Image: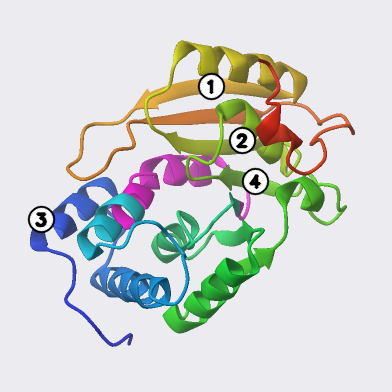
Amino acid sequence: MIARTTTLPSDAWQASARQVAPELTAAGIEQLARFRDLILHTNAQFNLTAIRDPAEIDNRLLLESLRLATLVREFAESHAGPVRAVDMGTGAGIPGIPLAILFPDIEFSLIDATAKKVRFVDETIEALGLTNARAIHGRVEELAREPHWRETRDLALARAVGSLATLLELAMPLLEVGGRAIFPKGALETAEISGAKNAANLLGAKLLDIIQLDPLDGCPVTHVALADKMTLVIDRYPRRSGLPAREPLGG
């Protein structure tokens, strides 16, 4: 069992967590508390995340990740066979590590281009005893060109890194036909949604829905975008590293 190094999240937090993620067990809450401790400890050594307050980590990193539970569960239940998920630009392991704690039957690959962050995620996976997660050092634009990555995953996640059009260009080349992307976002403007729909047409994808989440104390994420992979992606996508973010498709 994982030792507690600080107190568990508050009772109110635990109630909110179980409300959005009924699968969460007492052992899972202990793992999440340990994860928070590891983030705090590492942040004292290098800039892992700009969020440094324990309560903010509980809310803005852990609880916001758990808010995706229903959408992940619904996809997994409708998918034939094991689910292989990829967390793009995972940073400190968000949302991949909380979701790996919650869904031990889903395989999670957590990708980041910063070696120090990947090392932290790798050490955290080992410390938490997670057997269904691994850390990957690399850029998605480059990995998506490799045969053992391209169009081999079922589920793609990313925590609000870039526009929807950028996220679609990164995710769709990794997904098999029938795969799904789940992107938590803040408030979405009409122009960003329109650009994402145009990008989806170029990427063999369909923007399914923009879900507005119920308000939850301490959680600024208000929307989740869902997109499905409908057809194979043409060879030119994703474009070279950095271009999807600098010049989003569909603008």
Q: Amino acid at mark 1?
A: Leu
**Which circle marks residue 154 in the picture?**
4
Q: Nearer the viewer, residue 41 or 226?
A: 41
The range drawn in magenta is 62-85
Q: Can residue 105 be seen in the rendering of this structure?
A: yes
Q: Give the structural element (helix, strand or loop) at label 2.
A: helix
Q: Amino acid at mark 3?
A: Ala
**Which circle marks residue 167 in the picture?**
2
- Do residues under tags 3 and 2 come within 8 Å of each other at their CB atoms? no
Q: Which tag is nearer the camera, tag 3 or tag 1?
A: 3
Between the C-alphas of marks 3 and 2, the distance is 33 Å
Badge 4 crowding class, 10 Å Cα cut-off, few under 14, some 14 to 19, many 20 or more, is: many
**Which circle marks residue 208 in the picture?**
1
Q: Earlier in the sequence, mark 2 or mark 1?
A: 2
Between the C-alphas of marks 4 and 2, the distance is 15 Å
* Percent of width and height locating residue 144: 79, 47
Q: Which tag is nearer the camera, tag 2 or tag 1?
A: 2
Q: Amino acid at mark 2?
A: Leu
Q: Is residue 71 magenta?
A: yes
The type of colouring in the image is rainbow
Q: Which residue is mark 3?
A: 12
* Percent of width and height locating residue 250: 68, 16
Q: Which tag is nearer the camera, tag 3 or tag 2?
A: 2
Question: Does residue 230 appear to the left or right of 103 in the view shown?
Answer: right
**Magenta span dominant secondary structure:** helix
